[in-house]
Image (cartoon, coloured by chain):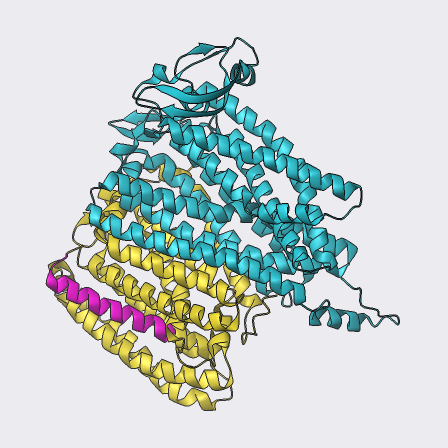
Amino acid sequence: MFEHVSPEMLGNIYVGLLGLSVLLYAILDGYDLGVGVLIPPRTEAFRDDMIASIGPYWDANETWLVLAVGLLLIAFPEAHSEVLQTLYLPATFMLLGLILRGVAFDFRAKVVQVNKRKWDLVFKYGSLLTTLAQGYMLGIYVTGLRTDLWAQAFAVLAALGVTAAYAFIGSCWLILKSEGELQQKAYYWAKRGLGILALGIVSVSIANLSLHEEVRDLWLSAPWGVMLFAIPVTCFALLTLCGVLLKKLPHSDGKGEWLPFFIALLVFLLCFTAFAISYYPFIIPGQMMISDALSDASSLRFLLVGVVVVVPVILAYTVMVYKIFSGKSEKLSYY
Amino acid sequence: MDAFLLSRLQFALNISFHILFPTITMAMGWFLFYFKMRSNISGHPVWMRMYRFWVRVFALSFALGVVSGVTMSFQFGTNWPGFMEKVGNVAGPLLGYEVLTAFFLEATFLGIMLFGIRRVPNWLHTTSTLIVALGTTTSAFWILALNSWMQTPQGFEVVDGVVYATNWKEIIFNPSFPYRFVHMMLASGLTASFLIAGLSAYRMLKGDDKLAPKLALKTATYTAAVLIPLQIFAGDMHGLNTLEHQPQKVAAMEGLWETTEGAPLLLFAIPDEEGRENHFEIPIPYAASLILTHELKGEIKGLNEFKGEHPPVAPVFYGFRVMVGMGMLMLAVSWLGSIYLMRNRSFPVWLKRTFAGMAFSGWVATLAGWYVTEIGRQPYLVSGVLKTTDAVTQLPPSNIAISFTLYAVIYSGLLIAYIGTLMLMCRRAVEIEEITTEEREIAKAKMSPNNNPVTV
């Protein structure tokens, strides 16, 4: 099957799938990592409810990372080994963070009270380690895997930016899923996160322009550049709107509580689109093209059958689960 | 230490830690489905109570399996880039199918299974339990297809040093796959059975005289008693298959240096690779030939036929004996337990202690078995196609040393926490109220006049 699909086309399909997985991962695991980062370390209140709000989802959310890394490994093996060997230590730290937060989630519900707080802290700092490592890796990746001082500084900026973005979408999720005091707290977190996120987007965008000449030329050339600027403009309009909403919503009797999360989702989508336009057709910015890294076409065609059949099914049952658990989260009746 | 040794140690550590948890969850998913079906059919609350207790064990084990599994997908690229460069065209799609057809299924429906019982209709909750069980089994299918292909590769061609797939049916259903899949599923069944039986026995030792642990102990003991002879048979068939396709591995398992007609079965020996001989042999004459060729004078090839191409002998030799020894112990204990159960006699304390002590015996046997088959594949990563040394990374050894140390520390901590938490859950279950609030609600809803809660 798919004998007529050319290698170029396969490259585009798989890079598209990779992009979809990364985007879905950033949004989905983004909010649950964000909730983890926001866990208040000193006050006992909120923790149970915050963790209950992500209970049924985090496992499946994390699977998008496995798919993304898997697709990179399967379709672009050279890029996979190049990227991950360069980012070996940050990737290790990210994995350790993911391990710690993933198990802390399950352990906390089953241990005695004194140990519960310890696992809550493991959950928080594991999440933080993960988001920082992911941001750092994204930063180094965008520079084209450079390791000089300027690239390191950019990566540190990206680490903070990604953490802020996750914390922001996490607080928007909490606005959607929680009530009462926790929701008030979530509004407060979202307002603070919004400012930091806006600052982060501006600085990362500007720094980004200094990294690759092609990218600078693309964004600063008429008429393409002008059209492209619609993206950051929309992005900022949305963030401003969100700022207004965050002031008004707490007094709106629960109407429109989904809006901040929806806006956060759109902002993620826009940032991702801008990024994709900047670096296509590279699989490693400025270093390796999609076509140079692509593995054997017939193997990719074989897997494509599964992709075409299974991915829509995955999306369908993911939507189903979100519907089942829609509304305010309940206390985890975790048996 | 060099990058090669460190990478091997790290991979061994990661996969050894990882496999502990899928080995439990693969079969426990089916146990849970069974409990749920019994609950649906009989309506007796004890089955749901068993479901509740074991689904929490399942969730904890599953989480540990997921997070330790994520690291594996990174290590292919970071530590073994040569693997994907050379055989990625075969390994890639098999891994891809595993993620697509199994991982999402398990992770998504697990949410419903754990937290959805009041949000979805009962049939959907039962179906979700079934889907999770199917998902874990599907996952095993794909990863064992890849592992078996690495042992007995076929259905490919090599062009300019790179492997290209020519026939996917041959790749997936390669010669060792059916045996390995059955052997592993049965291993999982035994591991879960002994875990369930062991922890239930532990609960009873701590003074739990409710019905739930008794019933769980009974179910698991009978399951183990049925599975263990099947496993011995499947293991024997797997051994014959290995003799046909990887005779050097069998020679190492048997500690046989010279090709021999009528080879003895060594109950014990200390293989000496330098001197290419064994010390302190305890042989049973002709037994190895009899088992492997079904003839007293059957010829078995010795390690000296494969000089430089055979695995390190000692770990394979010992690993095999640990696995078989554990299997025999499982046979004895599960049959003894079944005899007590069939006579409707309760277990004496020493037998409960034995079961509790064997709660994690499945892990020992499974790990030993995996060491036999994976070390037995060396010096190749993919038999006859790719040597392990040719796949390793050029990363600085210090980086791998750092990551290896961190993994070792965290995994040790998690293993202690895991076992400690399971035991704590058991001790807590002893004191837990016999009827849960939810059951009371259900009972109230039914409003039967003589609403005596069943004491369980």
**Residue at figure coordinates x 52%, y 26% from the top left:** B238
Which segment did they paint magenta?
A: A147-169
x, y percentage for residue B319?
45, 33
Question: Is residue A194 shown left or right of residue B2?
Answer: right
Let me know if residue B440 appears in the view: yes
Give the overall secondary structure of the magenta segment: helix
Image vertical order of residue B109 relative to residue B101, above or below: below
Q: Residue furthest front?
A: B280
Image vertical order of residue B358 relative to residue B61, above or below: above
The chain drawn in cyan is B
Q: Quadrant of the C terminus of chain B?
A: bottom right
Relative depth, front residue between B157 and B54: B54
Q: Quadrant of the N terminus of chain B?
A: top left
Image vertical order of residue B380 relative to residue B17, above or below: above
x, y percentage for residue B411?
40, 53
Question: Is residue A1 shown left or right of residue B307?
Answer: right
Name the quadrant containing residue A24.
bottom left
The chain drawn in yellow is A
